[in-house]
Image: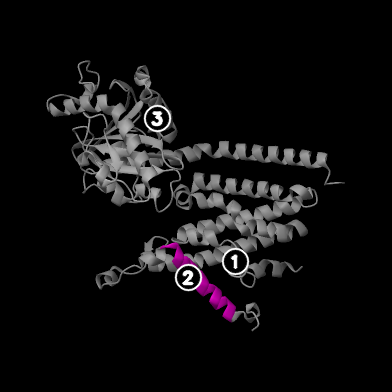
Amino acid sequence: MNLKEVLLKPIFKGNPITVLVLGICSSLAVTVQLKGACVMALSVTVVTGLSSFVCSLLRNSIPNRIRIIVQLVVVSLMVILVDQVLKAYAYSISKTLSVYVGLIITNCIVMGRIEAFALGNKPIPSLLDGLANGVGYGLILVVVAFFRELLGSGTLFGFRIIPESFYEAGYMDNGLIILPPMALILLGIIVWIQRSVQKDLQEEE
Amino acid sequence: MNTNGNTYTVIYSTVLVVLVAAILAFVAISLQGKQNENIKLETVSKLLGAAAQADESFSIAEDADVLGLYAKHITDAFYVDGNGKRGDEMNMGKNNVKDIVVTTTSDLKKQNDIMKKIEAGDESLKGELDLPVYVFDINGRKITVIPCYGAGLWGPIWGYIALAEDGKTIVGTVFDHKGETPGLGAKITEKFFCDEFKGKSFDMDNGTVFTVAKPSALKYPEHGVDAISGATITSQALGKSINIWAKNYGPYLISAAAENAVPAETPEVTGTDENVNVEE
């Protein structure tokens, strides 16, 4: 398998959120603010990359019967490490992300990529595949968070973007966009755009 | 090698789990110092945040040096027991903000466990309580901040309550929780709920000091606030924890209020007076 394809496919053509439709729940929950989305994207990328790498290293020694359990142990190790590091060095963000860092364990992308790719491939391609899937996930997260924070709070990374004069003229932040359903609608729009660009994703009539 | 045999599977999983546990233990211990510092910083900012609500002109900027502000405005920090007797002092960081000592939630949990035993009837444990009291000077007002702690729906909930000079009127509150339901119980941290407490007071005479319940269930509206709809268990748990904590602080608060009522008195002798009016 071509390394370049491994690296690029999950970012657009085989994006875990918009094409594989994995990891939807956390993308609804942590996209209210861009900052949280970026940290979450980074955390997931680290976790998917490292756990794919470790599982791929172990792939020939793992007893087949306890395969999933071993994967879970590896994934939870990585997640707890990320959680601990965030608590030590990015405390306020770790509070905003709260349970969702811990819930990376249940993020389908992580286990999905280990099962589908890491167990059948060498460590380096697995690492790249994990990282690329994390980036693909993060990309969507950041795009959704960009619109939600801009339209929902009028800020980006906490800095005010929409000028005060707009508010004085009667502009109001859209409270609805802060709520989870709007994230789903935004995701839907992204999927729509992707499918109209990428014709091979469309079902035949 | 046969990787599917029973022996191999058992040995493999044992080694893996022990290895992972060792890594996690090592990381947890090496990052603990840094994490505790974060927790301390957060506690300090919550204490200050509760006290600051006493004066609307006193606002804390988001990037403010919280430790410095705390050291500047705190005038007294110490422990009292359940009889109102003053114990050890806490370092207020007047010389070096790194030395600030505050009680974190794990300390509060220990006190809460003792309180539960007292509630169950073991009154002799009152002397063993080490309840933290923080006294701030907010633009000339003497504001006392006390914590509360208890079990919510999913995990612990806690908070800091700022009291006016009379030792019972609430001037500010900050609440926090470990993992209450987002959108329901988690709302106890929000401003609209905390603001409800302002102006309400502790009822030191009638047994129940404070209640959080629906308006129709509030016997004394001035000694309670409206619960959050859909979060009955969290709200009631919060009311219960405020009640039990305030009850144990009662003897101290009453004697401190008596001190404050006499203007010429120095605030030094708080709680050491043997003749204080101890709650029945």
What amino acid type is highlighted by mark number 3? Asn
In contact (CB < 8 Å): disc 1 and disc 3: no
Q: Chain of mark 1?
A: A
Q: Is residue B6 above or below residue A49?
A: above
A119 displayed left or right of B215: right
| Residue to which mark 3 is pinned | B112
In the rendered structure, the answer to whether residue B155 lies left or right of residue B201 reads: right
Residue A18 visible in the picture: yes
Callout 1: 10 Å neighbours few (<14), some, many (20+)? few
Residue A135 painted magenta: no
Query: Which residue is tagged 1?
Result: A21
Q: Residue at x 67, y 41 (%)?
A: B20
Question: In this picture, is B81 found above or below A122?
Answer: above
**Up-down: is A154 above or below A47?**
below
Instruction: Give percent across and percent down for residue A198.
Output: 62, 79
In-front residue for pair B211/B261? B211
Image disc number at residue B98: none
Labels 1 and 3 positioned on one and the same chain: no
Q: Which residues are drawn in magenta?
A: A179-196
Q: Give the residue type at disc 1.
A: Val
| Tag 2 secondary structure | helix
Secondary structure state at the residue bearing disc 3: helix
**B214 and A100: which one is in front?**
B214
Visible residue check, residue B138: no
Residue on which disc 2 sits: A185
In the rendered image, residue A178, in percent from the top left (x then y), is placed at 40, 63
Q: Residues within 10 Å of mark 2 (few under 14, many from 20)?
A: some
Label 2 marks a residue whose chain is A
Asked which colour scheme the image uses, the reply is one colour
The spot of residue A29 in percent (x, y) is 48, 58
